[in-house]
Image (cartoon, rainbow, N blue to C red):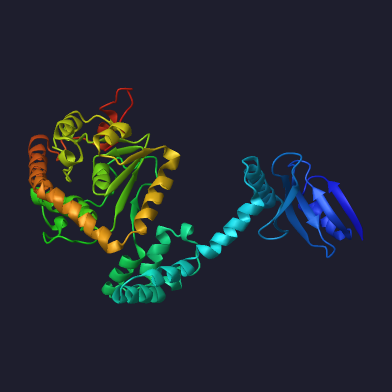
Amino acid sequence: MRFVIATGKITKRTLDALQAGAVTGFLWDDELKGFGAKITAGGSASYVVQYRMGGREAKTRRYTIGGHGSPWTPFTAREEATRLLRLVAQGIDPVESDKQRRREAVELAFSNYADRFAADCKGKGWSTLVTRSLHLHVKPVLRDKALPTITRIDVVAVFDRMPAEQAANRRNVFAVLIRAIVLTANGKHFSSGHDIGTPGRDADLPAKVRRSLLGDHSALDGAAWAYVREQELYLGLCRRWRAIPKPTIAAVYGACIAGGLMLAWVCDLIIASRDAFFSDPVLRMGIPGVEYFAHAFEMHPRVAREFLFLGERLSAERAYMLGMVNRVVERDELETEAMTIAERLATLPPFGLTLAKQAFNQAEDAMGKRATMDAAFGLHHLAHAHAQMTTGSAISGQSAHSMAGKPRDADGEDTPST
């Protein structure tokens, strides 16, 4: 059997020819330097990448992508080789990176982490609750999945597996599994505000889940319809978020307008990207601020007046200087920064963190935050009723399109729709 080292484009045809020719050796691609195929004495083929770390004097290293066949074809192997060679150009060794990934797969496997976590729990009652909840409800779903790859979908799958009537068990699993919450978005902006224009939106439908005792807004009319709906879906929702016993972090980027402010303000910490900006332009609708009226508590009342009266953009940098934002980072660092903080919070004693959060909430309420919101919410709906009586529209005839057109910032750019 001959040993050969050949060059040429790696295709299925060339590989088939080498495998049929009873040869061993390498075929190096003549288009992508470092990408090759290895033929063994048994006739099998595998794709490899050959490279050096540290220049021409460095030792040649070889990384095996995988055997020829699903999922590795000449096309997919070439794409993977391109990715690996790009890592090499960045100074990352694919061999060492793969070893690290394998170590993490064991060290960060959820089942191993869960066992270590349960063993570290103090107090017989808490330790028993954690061990039982993880064993019965969480480990059967997450198994050995690596911690960094666990997503919201995985967590939802844990709760979906539990019968709805097991409310107590669901609360226990929530207490064990969720240690910190990061609230962010997946579009161009964090939030452009309330939906005031989407065709077919569900404003006239009953709330899927009602928490207040005011009843079903869809069965009411006039001012009662709006008051009950917004008490449930806006003010009530925000207060429930604020009262979550877990620490919450808002990761804000792009526009954070009107309703978006409410989502950020209910969180314990706000991390913003440098391109983020904040705005509450609802006075153009004749409305004295959003339903969750935290303006005078998020910034000095003098600045809050300017913010609401003028409806101008507040940059992330100025929001940081005013104390409304905790940290400002580059856009591509936002997720990492928010998750790093969440991971630090997750290591703290959960009950102590819950009590600290309650202490801050109670301090704010003692300074009048809750009473201010109750008063402002009534004024908010007086404004809705006045606008309806004088213009025929609860928002003074404004629409998503009209709100998107103005005001403009100092650079002459339009503010996204509210």
How far from the left and from the top, in percent, is residue 169? 30, 74
Q: Is residue 216 visible?
A: yes
Direction from residue 41 to residue 223 in the image, left or right: left
Using the image, determine if residue 301 lies above or below residue 93.
Answer: above
Which quarter of the figure is the C terminus placed in? top left
Using the image, determine if residue 217 lies above or below residue 143.
Answer: above
Most foreground residue, 287 or 256: 256
Q: Determine which quarter of the picture holds residue 300.
A: top left
How far from the left and from the top, in percent, is residue 166? 29, 75
Q: Determine which quarter of the picture holds residue 141.
A: bottom left
Direction from residue 173 to residue 305 in the image, left or right: left
How far from the left and from the top, in percent, is residue 280? 22, 36
- State how many labels appear: 0
Which quarter of the figure is the N terminus placed in? bottom right
Most foreground residue, 218 or 144: 144
Residue at left offset 37%, top offset 35% = 274
Most foreground residue, 360 or 167: 360
How far from the left and from the top, in percent, is residue 253? 36, 40
Q: Is residue 243 visible?
A: no
Residue at left offset 9%, top offset 51% = 224
Direction from residue 51 to residue 261 in the image, left or right: left
Q: Which residue appears farthest toward the top when viewing the image?
A: 411
